[in-house]
Amino acid sequence: MQKPDGQKLTEALAAKFASPTRSTRLTVVLGRWLGITFTVCFLTGLFSHGLQNPPAWMFFPTSPVWIYQLTQGLHVTSGIAAIPLLLAKLWSVFPELLAWPPVKSVVHGLERASIALFVASSLVQLATGLINTYKWYPWPFPFRETHYWLAWVIWGSLLLHIALKLPVIAAHWRSKRAQETAVVESAAPAGGGVVEATPEPGTSGPGRWTRRAFLTAVTGATGAVVVTTAGQSFSWLAPANFFAPRKMGTGPQGVPVNRTAGDAKVAGLAMSPEWALVVKSADSTRSFTLDELRAMPQHTQELPIACVEGWSQLAQWRGVRVQDLVAAVGAPAGSRLRFTSLEPEGAYRTMTMPAEYTQDEKTLVALELNGSVLHLDHGYPARIIAPGRPGVLQTKWLQSMEIL
């Protein structure tokens, strides 16, 4: 019987791209690494999303102060690490994607659908996530909402794929050499002796690109992209930060800036001698001029500014405790607060602060940064700095503080 044209083409392509390096075991190993990076990225992303869009049950940790610096650094770093791992895994299964017929059964159809959904959503997620770290948005859809829901699509399709491929994964979880060694040891004579195991095909041979060499190359590539970008999040890797969009120690007062006063269109209002911070409660309203804020007890805290794009910077902040301003208008110490910026517009013009931050003595209305008056781009005349919060919620160019 003559083969269908589709099958002929598939077999020709499969033969052309065939490689002794590919194997089910290789795919399982790459899938294991990819699963770890995607899991870390997914969980840390949920934490970040919860801080910015808190559900009713959300818990807001303020200690350690670097918790968001760590989780968001891991989020972006694991996302970057997943890029070479995903490409390597796609290479390892490429011939299977050309299998004919495309769907052989209901289970096979589900498997193919889960793979298609996972691959498509992962490529979009990783590409847009990487571009977002450079604060470039060439697409028409809202990034944050799309990023959040794509994460659930990826996670769901990944779980479905694992469930469908579980027997294959279990059979190849350990290396063939380890499996053969276990069999050999169990069959060894009681009096001792050695039984030679057959080397795993494709792992050795002169002039051959082995699976071990391929995994080494993938490991090296993944390590390289991590080491040369993670320095924007982790200070011990900062000297090797060659490609990340932000570098520690740069920017006004030695701290990077995402949104400048020019971007926010606040320079005139922020520099006005008439500026005052309005603090409102149900029973009273007070306005604090900059001189009055400076006359209040000043406190110094070392806190990181950590942004959703992955970069962070530890800095010394000095200013008035938020809890002192709450007390100044006679409001309860555990109040929720709403801060409003001088910005005329923007998604983060207003910010709600849960009681956990209000009660923490490290939460400041900061007036100074690293020993000098706040630079205009860092929020002059006053900004919020609180432990364990995303940078977008550390409101700059304060206008008012309301007790809710």
Image (tube, rainbow, N blue to C red):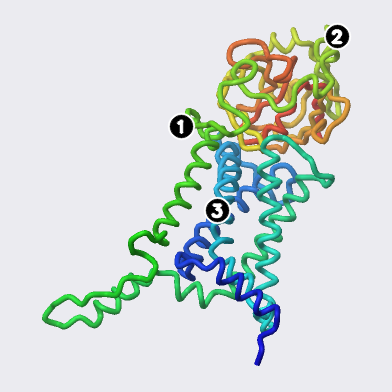
Instruction: Measure the C-alpha gap from mark 1 to mark 2.
Output: 44 Å
Instruction: Identify the mark at residue 37; answer none if there is no mark.
Output: 3
Mark 3, other Cα within 10 Å: few <14 / some 14–19 / many ≥20: many
Amino acid type indicated by mark 3: Thr
Q: On the rendered structure, is 25 left or right of 41? A: left
Of mark 2 and mark 3, the one earlier in the sequence is 3
Mark 1, other Cα within 10 Å: few <14 / some 14–19 / many ≥20: few
Of mark 3 and mark 1, the one earlier in the sequence is 3
Q: Disc 3 on helix, strand or loop?
A: helix
Which residue corresponds to the image point at 84% horizontal and 9% vertical from the top-left? 272
Q: Disc 2 on helix, strand or loop?
A: loop
Which quadrant holds the C terminus? top right
Instruction: Identify the mark at residue 236; answer none if there is no mark.
Output: 1
Give the x, y percent position of residue 153.
71, 61
Res. 295 visible in picture = yes
Which residue corresponds to the image point at 81% horizontal and 24% vertical from the top-left? 264
Residue placed under numbered mark 2 in the picture: 274
Q: Disc 1 on helix, strand or loop?
A: helix
